[in-house]
Amino acid sequence: MNDSVTVLNLASVLEDSASNYGAKTAIVFGDQKYTYAQINGAASQIANGLKNVGIGKGDKVALSMLNLPYFPMIYYGILKTGAVVVPLNVLLKRKEIAYHLKDSEAKAYFCFIGTPELKMGEEGFAGYSTVDECENFWLVTPPGMDSPIEGAPTLTSMMKDQSPAFNAVVTSPMDSAVILYTSGTTGQAKGAELTHLNLYSNAQASTTLLTAQSNDVHCIALPLFHSFAQTVQMNAGIMMGSTLVLIAKFMPDVVLSAFENENVTVFAGVPTMYWALLNYPKASEHNLEKISQTLRLGVSGGSAMPVVVMKEFEEKYKINILEGYGLSETSPVASFSRGDLMKKPGSIGVPIRGVQMMIADHDGNPVKVGDTGEILIRGPNLMKGYYNRPEATAEAFKGGWFHSGDIGKQDEDGFYYVVDRLKDMVLRGGFNVYPREVEEMLMTNPKVSQVAVVGEPDDQYGEEVVAYVVLKAGETATSEELVTWSKENMAAYKYPRRVYLKDALPMNATGKILKRVLRDEKK
């Protein structure tokens, strides 16, 4: 692969497919359909609009957007100018948005203003209140909706009379293409600076791993502002000339309808999405036989999938689920369960082509096969660094490897496993307890539907193992009953001494369970 020479601009994935598949449907959103030629033409109009206000190579342009057709139009339009896309989490509030705009030094900002059906966040979306943080600002409104802010420029007005042709600015492989902000659970969010080569090569690797075809139909329910959907589905799908079915917000009924009506072949999600689809009480109202005949592949990432959920989903929908692993800093895919290798449920597979992984101790030295340690990564998928944070970058790349912050292990066949997040590990009375291991065991209880295990401060043991449990529909159990069951099925040092029953577990916009929220409940 000679990407260091051939990759000039990530926007080429759209331009090439528009040239090869111009009349083919690229994007489906509800009853709206857009061809590759239309998406590329709109991106070029946006690029011309940006150029007219002085946006060019290296400038940062922020984007707050649900999974709507505007997202790829704006994303590739920004890239065409040689500027850098800064996708923002749609659930951010006013002060958080202001921080991201200032930290990224954004010169322009595209902000979606929704209808009640497409509302962003609990209080609507207040992103427009932060326009003083950047020089240029456009509201993105649904078709036919006037600007809710007097005099505010809209995307429609910005694109008016712009040419649907634009010669993409030539960039070098190591020029920045996208800045993705980390969740900031351990402090202020940091921007991972990803290059055109990072993202192009990772999208290309994804097409191989998914055995992608131009006739694939991707259902994209993961947020496009996150690296998973952005690389593995949007960039990789458009690279192959596939059709992308966009889901604004994940809801089991909407996703199953998309599977059924659009003949979806590939679905990617985090484990909680698979769990929700598996436990959706009205699933039988959909043509599951037709879905099973069309859907060929499931992809899971974001966090480790419970083995029991994977097995039940594969049996119900007659598909194979492949697990991958990565972070925003790794573009994101670092390892993947390859279809040509043996299937090991619970494994994140093997490193993708060109990427190396190592399980290391506190000093950065490799541990024995089967022992646990931190997952270290190096390869062409690694970010340039954290934007304007040289100290944090140096800390993350100690010894020439990227330190993931995840605890993992490797087996004798070279397969890797995520044991837990380093910060989530519970130290109880001198013993390391990995919450995922406890969660996997509790999930085998026939009454348990979902579990999150955390550590709580304890005067005697330093930390105590605590489980938050959601029961299956129609099941009843007491906390004491679940503690007793755990004691009978787990080692004395690891079983949860406290179990709290919940109706639901808190999740973020990507569907990850928010353990920090659970910890804060008991402070």
Image: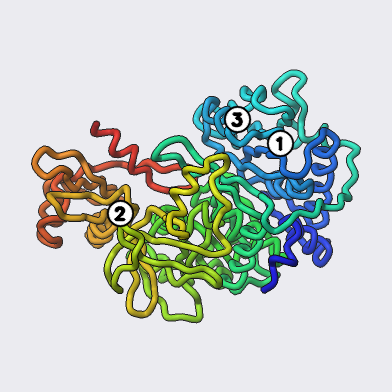
What residue sits 68% from the left and 28% below the top? Answer: 134
- Residue tagged by mark 3? 102
* Residue furthest to the top: 150
Q: Earlier in the sequence, mark 2 or mark 1?
A: 1
Q: Tell me the CA gap for discs 2 and 3.
A: 42 Å
- Residue tagged by mark 1? 142
- Secondary structure under the numbered disc 3 in the rendered image: helix
Image position, residue 277 (x, y; %): 45, 56
Where residue 135 sits, quadrant-wise, is top right
Q: Is residue 457 above or below residue 309?
A: above
Image position, residue 328 (x, y; %): 52, 52
Q: Is residue 240 above or below residue 392?
A: below
Q: Is residue 311 visible?
A: no
Q: Earlier in the sequence, mark 2 or mark 3?
A: 3
Q: Is residue 217 above or below residue 343?
A: above
Left or right of 380: which side holds 411? left
Point out the image quarter for the N terminus. bottom right
Q: Nearer the viewer, residue 74 or 29?
A: 74
Point out the image quarter for the C terminus. top left
Image position, residue 73 (x, y; %): 74, 47
For residue 481, which numbered disc appears in the image? none
Q: Tell me the CA gap for discs 2 and 1.
A: 38 Å
- Residue tagged by mark 2? 449
Q: Residues within 10 Å of mark 3 (few under 14, many from 20)?
A: some
Q: Amino acid at mark 2?
A: Ser
Q: Nearer the viewer, residue 55 or 75?
A: 55
Q: Tell me the CA gap for discs 1 and 3.
A: 27 Å
Q: Nearer the viewer, mark 2 or mark 3?
A: 3
What residue sits 13% from the left and 56% below the top? Answer: 485
